Image: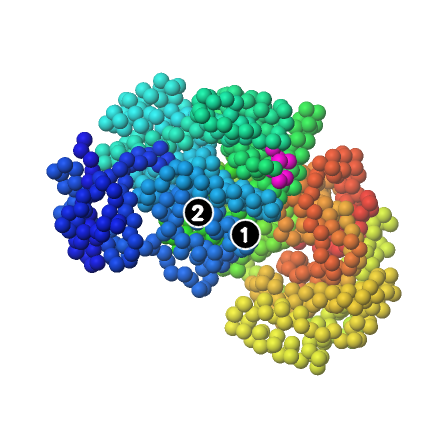
Amino acid sequence: MEPLILHWALAKKPGEWEAPPSSIVPSGSTVLDKACETSFGESELDGLQYQVVEIELDDGRYKGMPFVLRRGETWIKNNDSDFYLDFNTKVTKKSKDTGDAGKGTAKDFLERIADLEEDAQRSFMHRFNIAADLVDQARDAGLLGIVGLFVWIRFMSTRQLIWNKNYNVKPREISQAQDRFTDDLENMYKSYPQYREILRMLLSAVGRGGEGDVGQRIRDEILVIQRNNDCKGGIMEEWHQKLHNNTSPDDVVICQAIIDYIKSDFDINVYWDTLNKNGITKERLLSYDRAIHSEPKFRSDQKEGLLRDLGNYMRSLKAVHSGADLESAIATCMGYKSEGEGFMVGVQINPVNGLSSGFPDLLQFVLDHVEDKSAEPLLEGLLEARVELRPLLIGSSERLKDLIFLDIALDSTFRTAVERSYEELNDAAPEKIMYFISLVLENLALSTDDNEDILYCLKGWNRAMDMVKQKDDQWALYAKAFLDRTRLALASKGEQYYNMMQPSAEYLGSLLNVEEWAVDIFTEEVIRGGSATTLSALLNRFDPVLRNVAHLGSWQVISPVEVTGYIVVVDKLLSVQNKTYDKPTILVAKSVKGEEEIPDGVVGVITPDMPDVLSHVSVRARNCKPHFSLSKVLFATCFDLNILSELQGHEGKVFSFKTTSADVTYREVSDSELSISSDAQGGEAIPSLSLVKKKFLGKYAISAEEFSDEMVGAKSRNIAYLKGKVPSWVGIPTSVAIPFGTFEKILSDETNKEVAQNIQMLKGRLAQEDFSALGEIRKTVLNLTAPTQLVKELKEKMLSSGMPWPGDESDHRWEQAWMVIKKVWASKWNERAYFSTRKVKLDHEYLSMAVLVQEIVNADYAFVIHTTNPSSGDSSEIYAEVVKGLGETLVGAYPGRAMSFVCKKDDLDSPKVLGYPSKPIGLFIKRSIIFRSDSNGEDLEGYAGAGLYDSVPMDVEDEVVLDYTTDPLITDSGFRSSILSSIARAGHAIEELYGSPQDVEGVVKDGKIYVVQTRPQM
């Protein structure tokens, strides 16, 4: 075949042809009158052969290059016109934004990257050299700078950026540039341990060959193939979904079958022949978690591009499933034993120092078993190798970069082996699935820096396996708690990654015109490429098994009631809590944290989240009266993702829900049935609520003996009432109070005149529905000055009650206490409380705030009791929840579930555990004082106002990641039974004292029960 000729010239304006100066004419060219002819040369990059002409311009006089192509006497033109390359065309970037765009990023650094992108597109050599030049700037910008560098390199590795603009670079030059870049990353990894996790991800995106982690490329490149070849549906989309869920050696066969089909001019029989010869039947394709239903069906114009791209893709598949990428990484660290061994011909590499004598045998075992169908021994070997590498990776080892790449290859091989094992686990015993979960958790911990929570999850799973061996009938309930906690850990990690990476992906993507779909899924794809996704898939498989063994069913009903309404799907209940729905609505909310309000017009909330049964939103649901119903609001957690998906698919339709205490049934109904249901439910007017305005009665502080309904709220009065009346083994903390009217009295003081004027102005804005004024009022309240009389009276009352006076420690400690008191008063204007009172038409001006002052009991455990089971309404049964540490993690919006139990009132020695705790965080504090809100709007009949306002400790609590495997409440059945029985007895005694169901809060310290407040159960 005759060579391809470039017939070209230069132009100072479009339409002009001018022969180039001899100084830039490539060697071997022929200069003509007004043009030049240059033969294309053969070149190769990334295994792809292509033809190239390289021309270097040395001045800026020329504006473009007209050209045509010639092969022999055949001329190739742009339709009937010449081709024209405009030198003034730059990389198209959106203009830099001076507003909120780029918020949460190293904005200046990202803009610098965007400025350099055009040069970076010339070749890998240019990109890696530019990246090396940027390393110091990224480091100086901190974490977000390194994240920005990672986002840029990952856009490159996923082919969202141009790899090479026909720039002829030798592989050696690319390798040298890549080594320079990765050497700089290695040095930062050694010197800045706080960035190691993101630097590891960055090195993985670069990869040993500059193209990223080969395992991740399997997921990334299938998207590129679909888009490059206009084949987004059918078999390619189904295969893409399967690859994202779990890639296996079957994918090598599937890829080959599609290639053979295309090569045969689209003979479908050839496709099936290739599959069947390699043991893949139609039934097997349908058996995958993400089934492949479709046959390949392509157009003739797609043939060339698909063969090229699928051929390249086959190399990635084979590298993963044959272990070739791992083999290369091992060889680099272990050294090449001799010349003439496969791909090591003629190369001498010395082994890395510091590895144990048995490490080469361990790695050889891994290589020998990398394709085994039964993956368990391989997974154990891979983890053993990673554990042995760990000390070297956190030290300053020589050739650290090679060890990091080996660890990345071991991690990638591990993930692939687990995905290959999904089929093996289909009928596996629970112990085996739990063992696989523990292996994947350990692998995830080895790739994560801040891994304390993950390690405690791992300990929990190991104990669950021991419980199975010991035939402990609580094993499934216990394992379910750790499954939930593990999910929380994964969700927390995913949220951390999203907040860290996505803003940079969006801003840099906008500057570089990266396709929107690639930007939108950026963080999602990073997460899907790691062990977290593999672990999540295993948890989803195991959840229904555990729920079946533990007899938990698919639902937890928090507020049981029959409702009918329109299905509306929302991401977060928080985002719609202030909305009013104009027709009966059942929300399917993906996220419910526990402190939200139920929106007006909502008759039901279904969520996969697990707020505590005694959380604020749960209490509100059991007492909320939407304007379409006098009933409560249905509130239930659904653990079955298939049911949730079905309900989400019926958005906009009318459904009827019926409940028992443990199950929910539902059906679609007609609009007419909705009308009948609404008429039956909503025939009466909602009772009106009102507040009585409280006055300042001349005292800034009072002792418990002085508590009255004119001075303090029910919270303070109830705690004073209990003193001396509960059994002696129940402790009641010492209390004093700052009474009603004190805030208003201080605000009217001359010293606070400016604060009062500012608050009055902000109230005017609030009256005009400018709700941003709420936050400004809270800030303004903090500027109040304390009158000397308040300081004098409060000190006197606290000391006479046996409480420590903060000011005796230092003036600073009193100022600290005063700031906390103001924060309690300011919480009158928090958004949740304001909108809640507004919804039931309470006059917010009449809401008065006393402050209950108590010494904090440094709790081992905290509890909340409902003396009538709130889920079933059973008055013969006490329901309670317990957390480790202070009770804020129970009543506040802290993730995870508390330990829950029930206890029959006629058998208080036999508590029954309903669920073990999954809360990852406990709060602990030294000896301190807490200032509790005590308003006149918290315990009105028919209105669940408790928890709307803030109670604030003087000192910040310590957040501790909890290890339940060492907690006697979890591990010692005798201790657990004693503590839970004591809690139930305390609740029963208080109910008998009041003669009505009670909502009781308390703590346990050194085995003793303390009750800190009680109120009528709502």
Residue 289 lies left or right of residue 994; in this view the side is left
Q: Position of residue 481 (x, y in %)?
A: 64, 38
Write the residue at 55% across / 55% down: 140
Residue 949 is left or right of residue 137, and the answer is: right
Question: Is residue 61 placed above or below 548 in the rendered structure?
Answer: below
Disc 2: CA contacts within 10 A as few (<14), some (14-19) or many (>=20): some
SS at mark 1 in the image: helix
Give the Cα separation between the discs numbered 1 and 2: 16 Å
The quarter of the image holding the N terminus is top left
Sort mark 1 into few (<14), some (14-19) or many (20+) by Cα contacts within 10 Å: some
Give me the residue at 78% from left, 73% from top: 790
Q: Give the residue at mark 2.
A: 129
Amino acid type at image mark 1:
Arg
Q: Which residue is painted at 32% across and 55% down in the image?
A: 90
Seen from the viewer's position, the closer of residues 553 and 870 is 553
Label the magenta part by its dominant secondary structure.
helix
Q: What element carries label 2?
A: helix
Question: Given the current orientation, which residue lies at the most extreme left position?
Answer: 73
Can you see residue 422? no
Q: Quadrant of the C terminus?
A: bottom right
Which tag, 1 or 2, sits closer to the chain's start?
A: 2
Q: What stretch is highlighted in magenta?
A: 389-396
Is residue 664 covered in magenta? no
User: Does 390 appear in magenta?
Assistant: yes
Closer to the camera, 928 or 531? 531
- Identified by mark 2, the residue type is Asn
In x, y percent, where is residue 222? 38, 36
Q: Judge left or right: residue 152 versus residue 629.
A: left
Discs 1/2, front: 2
How far from the left and from the top, in percent, is residue 811? 79, 68
Q: Which mark is residue 139?
A: 1
